[in-house]
Image (cartoon, rainbow, N blue to C red):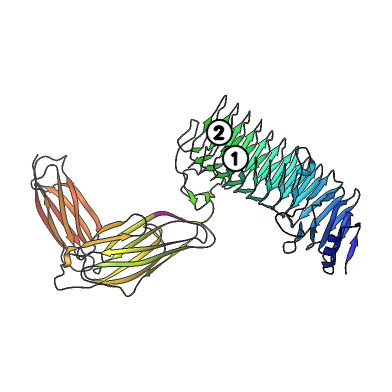
């Protein structure tokens, strides 16, 4: 059923539009109040609407409010438009074309508190010139009113002067958990413009792809309040400064925000621009990958503590015209240009990691070891952990303050990794001339906690000897993270024939093994193989290429092999071989049988060994090296003696 509420005569074209409207459609104009129900949706706004003083308009979840022309919904009384996660309220033009706009929601000296929640506000346009209220707040304009805006999507709105998305003036407002995307202002404040406000909280919002001359994400004038936990991303100040936020005569609290990939055409303060005695607290923010970092001009001296200012395309921090920013516990790393100090200005930093160095107690220059891949959290081995000021409040883990926007929780438990080796083309049989084995390595961390671990790979030869191939220390995975590599292992022709075993490990090398996996391959034999020659193994695909010398076959007997040079002065190299793992004693005596040096006393593995005998404190003469080997496996004990001549 069609219903008409408070609208007068319309043109013939409008009558044609009405005749095409579907049943259960409501047409509104003029003064409105009461309840707009989902049953009556959509509501077509045929002319300017107003909620008068003393009245309230309530809009139910799921209602669509469609403006058929450039009309506004003006609020002198209160508005309650509270949708739901899956049932939003939609304010837009009836014909969604780029040239079709409406005049926005306009709260002007509104009586009572209003709430917008789970609303979509699209394609509003604040038209007019400088000084006209109609030119401010493309989607929502709040002047001298109390309005909370939460969980809303503010999309593709624009203003001719201020506040493409929303405009707040003398407002008592909370703006929380909203998305401001692709809004534009011809002048200032692409997403939000705030002026003359002392009690505003702007938190947990996304501001992305907004544009303006200044303050593409947000423009703040003569205001205080709290700006926290927001993400300013890819906003563009297309002629001037402040890609993320522009502060003018304003000193709000900015904390835990991310300013990422913002651009200022003027190359100043693409992250944060502080002008004209703006001295906010800037705490625990990421200001990264913008075309410049922070700029302070005209007597602006913010407190800058625990921020990560990294990989910006211009200057990390600039101070000009009597500006004196100060702070501690920051990270300034990877920025294209260092600090800049202009006329009558200074930058005072302490306990900060500043690439290129900077005077100040506790400052240093070191790689902060971010996790990477767009994350500016710290690795467990970062030098910025516990490197903050000892006078700063402790981190939440009760340790000394870390540097940067994100502390590393030293009390969290670590995860556990698993490893899997997958040989390609199994079964693998190499020719006598050698060849290459290719295989994949996959390491997976458990889902709950990070893990800092070592990864290593060993090769077991056919005779049982083990050769370390690669060790990668201090690997890091996020909860549920994985690491994969495709590796190539090349074995030379002189390597012994037989079955080889490749084993990969994860854990704390060499004592703790969290997991391991292995596979085998075979090197064929030929009639002229020289079993004792050893060979070369080359591993590539995991960082630097590793080349190791393979061991020759295990000795068939235990023996003292001799020494060189002869005579010697003052050092000699003594060689011996073991046919099995054994308890070894190698001592040096003089001609009177007196012990002068103990060179070995303990377990040694099977194979060839050599060591250095330093006789620098002994007189010239004849000495005897005595090797005693106790074989616990019953193959026989061994005693060997050789003469050494020291000639000084």
Query: Residue 532 placed where, x, y %?
Result: 17, 65
Disc 2: which residue: 318
Circle nearer the viewer, 1 or 2: 2
Placement of the N terminus among the 4 image quadrants: bottom right
On-image quarter of the C terminus: top left
Q: Earlier in the sequence, mark 1 or mark 2?
A: 2
Image coordinates for residue 340, horizontal then vertical, percent: 52, 32
* Residue identifier under label 1: 393
Mark pair 1, 2: CA separation: 27 Å
Which of the 4 image quarters holds residue 228?
top right
Residue sitting at x 48%, y 42%: 334
Q: Position of residue 215 (x, y in %)?
A: 65, 41
Q: Element at badge 1?
A: loop
Q: Nearer the viewer, residue 611 or 407?
A: 407
Label 1 close to label 2 by CB (< 8 Å):
no
Question: Is 57 positioned to the left or the right of 389 in the image?
Answer: right
Residue stretch in magenta: 473-484
Is the residue 445 above or below the residue 319 in the image? Answer: below
User: Alpha-carbon neighbours of circle 2 within 10 Å: few (<14), some, or many (≥20)?
Assistant: many
């Amino acid at each position: 059923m069609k219903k008409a509420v408070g609208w007068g005569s319309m043109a013939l074209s409008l009558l044609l539009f009405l005749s095409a409207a579907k049943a259960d459609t409501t047409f509104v104009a003029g003064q409105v109040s009461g309840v707009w129900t989902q049953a009556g949706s959509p509501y077509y706004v045929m002319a300017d609407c107003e909620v008068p003083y003393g009245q309230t308009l309530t809009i139910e979840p799921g209602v669509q409010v469609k403006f058929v022309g450039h009309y506004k919904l003006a609020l002198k009384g209160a508005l309650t438009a509270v949708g739901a996660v899956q049932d939003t309220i939609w304010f837009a033009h009836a014909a969604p074309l780029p040239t079709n706009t409406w005049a926005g929601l306009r709260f002007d000296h509104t009586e009572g508190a209003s709430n917008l929640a789970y609303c979509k506000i699209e394609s509003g346009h604040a038209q007019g010139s400088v000084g006209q209220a109609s030119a401010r707040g493309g989607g929502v304009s709040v002047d001298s009113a109390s309005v909370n805006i939460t969980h809303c999507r503010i999309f593709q709105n624009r203003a001719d002067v201020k506040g493409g998305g929303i405009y707040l003036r003398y407002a008592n407002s909370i703006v929380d958990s909203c998305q401001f995307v692709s809004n534009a202002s011809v002048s200032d404040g692409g997403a939000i413009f705030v002026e003359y406000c002392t009690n505003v909280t702007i938190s947990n919002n996304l501001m992305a792809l907004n544009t303006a001359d200044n303050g593409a994400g947000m423009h703040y004038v003569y205001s205080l309040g709290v700006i926290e936990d927001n993400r300013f991303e890819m906003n563009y100040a297309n002629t001037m400064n402040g890609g993320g936020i522009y502060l003018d005569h304003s000193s709000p609290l900015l904390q835990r925000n991310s300013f990422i990939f913002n651009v200022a055409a003027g190359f100043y303060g693409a992250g944060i621009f502080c002008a004209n005695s703006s001295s906010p607290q800037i705490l625990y923010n990421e200001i990264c990958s913008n075309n410049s970092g922070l700029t302070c001009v005209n007597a602006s001296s913010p407190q800058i503590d625990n921020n990560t200012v990294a990989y910006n395309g211009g200057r990390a921090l600039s101070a000009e015209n009597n500006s004196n920013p100060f702070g501690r516990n920051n990270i300034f790393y990877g920025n294209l240009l260092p600090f800049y100090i202009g006329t009558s200005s200074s930058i005072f930093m302490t306990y900060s990691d500043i690439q290129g160095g900077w005077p100040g107690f506790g400052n240093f220059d070191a790689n902060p070891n971010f996790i990477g891949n767009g994350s500016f959290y710290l690795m467990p081995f970062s030098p910025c952990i516990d490197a903050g000021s000892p006078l700063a409040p402790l981190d939440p883990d009760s340790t000394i303050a870390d540097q940067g926007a994100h502390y590393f929780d030293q009390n969290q438990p670590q995860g556990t990794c698993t490893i899997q080796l997958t040989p390609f083309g199994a079964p693998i049989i190499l020719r006598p001339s050698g060849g290459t084995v290719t295989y994949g390595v996959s390491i997976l961390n458990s889902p709950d906690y990070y893990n800092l671990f070592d990864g290593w790979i060993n090769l077991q030869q056919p005779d049982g000897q083990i050769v370390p191939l690669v060790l990668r220390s201090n690997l890091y995975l996020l909860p549920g993270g994985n690491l994969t590599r495709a590796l190539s292992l090349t074995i030379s022709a002189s390597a012994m024939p037989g079955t080889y075993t490749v084993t990969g490990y994860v854990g704390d090398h060499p004592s703790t093994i969290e997991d391991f996996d292995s596979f085998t391959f075979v090197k064929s034999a030929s009639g002229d193989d020289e079993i004792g020659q050893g060979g070369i193994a080359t591993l590539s695909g995991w960082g630097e290429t590793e080349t190791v010398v393979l061991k020759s076959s295990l000795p068939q007997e235990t023996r003292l092999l001799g020494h060189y040079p002869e005579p010697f002065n003052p050092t000699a190299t003594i060689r011996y071989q073991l046919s099995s793992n054994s308890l070894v004693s190698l001592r040096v005596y003089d001609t009177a049988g007196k012990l002068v040096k103990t060179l070995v006393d303990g377990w040694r593995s099977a194979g060839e060994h050599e060591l250095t005998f330093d006789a620098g404190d002994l007189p010239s003469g004849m000495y005897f090296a005595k090797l005693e080997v106790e074989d616990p496996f019953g193959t026989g004990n061994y005693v060997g003696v050789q003469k050494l001549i020291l000639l000084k």
